[in-house]
Image (spheres, rainbow, N blue to C red):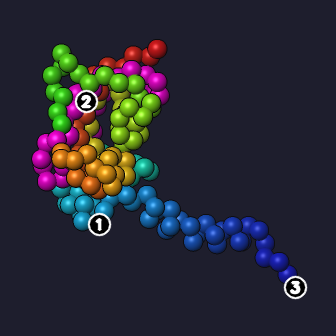
Amino acid sequence: MRIPCCRSVLFLLGLLLVPALHAQREKLPPADLEFVEQTWPTAKSTNTGIRYIIERAGQGAMPVPGDLVSVLYTGRLLNGTTFDNMSDPTQPFVFRVGRELVIQGWDYILPQMKRGERRLIIVPPELAYGTRGQPPRIPRNATLVFVIELLDIKHD
């Protein structure tokens, strides 16, 4: 009896796992996915399931976990309802990246942004407020849309 070559077995496993891994990356509910693909067809997707469009490119370094960032943002539900807004440049939202002070989607996307960059990001429910939501403003299992502008980064 001959034992199959390890490389052949690994290759076959790889072929079987690639579709499964791709399916795991899609985190938007099917109805939300259809809406997002129709509304923002040029949005790129990260391996975490966040979709984004760079509205204005930034320059320089990107923040790393622990950096203090200042941002302006508007948060909306898919139906267009604004649930949060900080758009006054004299009073930006300031927090440390990667310290679980914001939703996971933000901690994943901000380290990919440069100072001065503005992005539209679409965050799947599990990287936002998940099954709990944040009633009454954010319902359960809500896909969220943000426009985020990274104003400043302070490396401490």
Left or right: residue 121 versus residue 109 is left
The answer to whether 77 appears left or right of 123 in the picture is left
Q: Name the spot of residue 31 as percent of width and height, x first.
A: 24, 65
| Residue 97: image location, x then y, percent | 41, 29
Q: Which of 44 and 141 is in front in this view?
A: 141
Q: Mark 1 points at which residue?
A: 30
Query: Vertically, is 89 above or below 51?
Result: above
Q: Which residue lies furthest to the bottom in this view?
A: 1
- The image position of residue 104, as x and y in percent, is 39, 41
Q: Which numbered disc, 3 or 2, marks the residue that appears first in the sequence?
A: 3
Q: Does the magenta stretch include residue 75?
A: yes
Give the Cα distance between marks 3 and 1: 47 Å
Q: Quadrant of residue 3?
A: bottom right
Q: Tell me: 123 left or right of 112.
A: left
**Magenta segment boundaries in residue numbering:** 54-83
Frontmost of labels 1 and 2 is: 1
